[in-house]
Amino acid sequence: MQPEIITVSQFVGIINDTLAMAYPVVIVEGEVSSFKINQGKFVFFDLKDDTSTLSCFMMLHQLRLPIEDGMKIRVTGSPKITKFSKFSLTVKAIELAGEGELRRAMELLKRKLTAEGLFDVSRKRELPRYPRTIGLITSGTSAAYADFVKILSARWGGVTVKLADVSVQGVTAPDQIVDAIEYFNQASPAADVLVLIRGGGSLDDLSAFSTEPVARAVAGSRTPIIVGVGHEVDVSLADYAADVRAATPTDAARLVVPDRLEIEAQILFSAGRMEQSFGSLVESRHTIVDRHLNVLQRSIQRPSEAVRAAVLVLARNLERMHGRTAQMRVQSEVLQSRVEQSYERILRQRRDQITGLERLLKSASPQATLARGYAIVISGKSVVKDATSVTVGSPLMVQLAKGKLSVEVKE
């Protein structure tokens, strides 16, 4: 029986159908050669070993790592015959084979992004001091997640943690991490800070955090972001792009929230300083007012005695002049009246000054402080300044502006 006659296109289609059924997806390892990008969107390169060469094709947006000739890589793709009868591998994903290649690709990408200013210190933002909502990007089943939440609760507590459960390793990890960052950037209400973490592993395990899409997503995050990947010695490109780099996931928890014990100690210290300052202020006001009162009292006494003496002298002189002409008597009466008016004016001025200083003294007095809503707590005969100086059940007396209260310590 003679074979059916088919066209070239039909034959190419049959071969491609057969390849699709026999090898829908293959993973091939080899060395890159003849790497090039056409029209800013098509990637062509050859994959070779000691005896053979395989042509490869992919779209530029699928290329997540910088590739150059001589690199040893692992490609995932589907074999196909083109309409020009050229056999090639349509590549879906690329992985670097070996730590040496990973470091080489990472260094290439780092130089590229550094030249763009993606890692500039001037781009870094400070994390919020007291975040209320944290967007956490990691694997929800990982030890890194458990450690982060444990340290976070121990240090601060009361923080809402919204988890984006993503893969942190493998081919799909970069896309999931990028999508999570974008999700939190668009969420409403927005998180106060984003945290991207994963535990330790080999350079290959951590490679998702050194891909170009992840580094750009971290750098472009509208919400401040902290990255803690691997151990302290591990540094990914996401670490360089982040606003803050944490050495480990647990270090990220320490950096993103303060320690409540340290904050409580600072508050107690500040309260003590304020109490001391207030006491010193009241004491200094009392001293100043007392000094001014003494000075004014002496100044009042001196002018009044001098004026009285002048009045007496003038009166005696007027008496000698009595009997003289009516015109001189009128002049003496006018002069005496002026002297007495001057004396009264000086007294009024001094009294006004004393009244002002008395108001100042009253405003700084303990009674005035109580009238503003403060209270004095007394245990026995001592004023209570420290909550730790009394025990549960201790009777206390609370002095208010009006009256007193007898209370008992419950807690």
Image: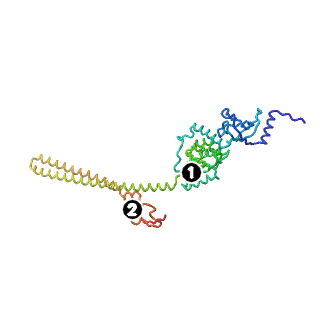
Task: Identify which residue, 201 or 346, lies in the foreground.
Answer: 201
- Mark 1 or mark 2, which has the lower sequence index? 1
- In the displayed structure, would residue 387 be above or below residue 242? below
Write down the residue under mark 1.
251
Asked if the residue at tag 2 contacts the one at tag 1, i.e. Cβ–Cβ closer than 8 Å, the answer is no
Circle 1: residue type = Asp
Query: What label does residue 285 carry, if any?
Result: none
Asked if residue 141 lies left or right of residue 288, the reply is right
Q: Indicate how the structure is coloured in the image.
A: rainbow
Query: What label does residue 402 carry, if any?
Result: 2
For the point 37% across and 55% down, the residue is: 280
Using a 10 Å C-alpha cutoff, classify the residue at mark 1 as few (fewer than 14 neighbours), some (14 to 19) or many (20 or more): some
For the point 62% across and 49% down, the residue is: 200
Report how far apart the C-alphas of labels 1 and 2 lie in the structure.
Answer: 53 Å
Where residue 346 appears, as percent x and y from the top left, is: 23, 50
Secondary structure, mark 1, is: helix
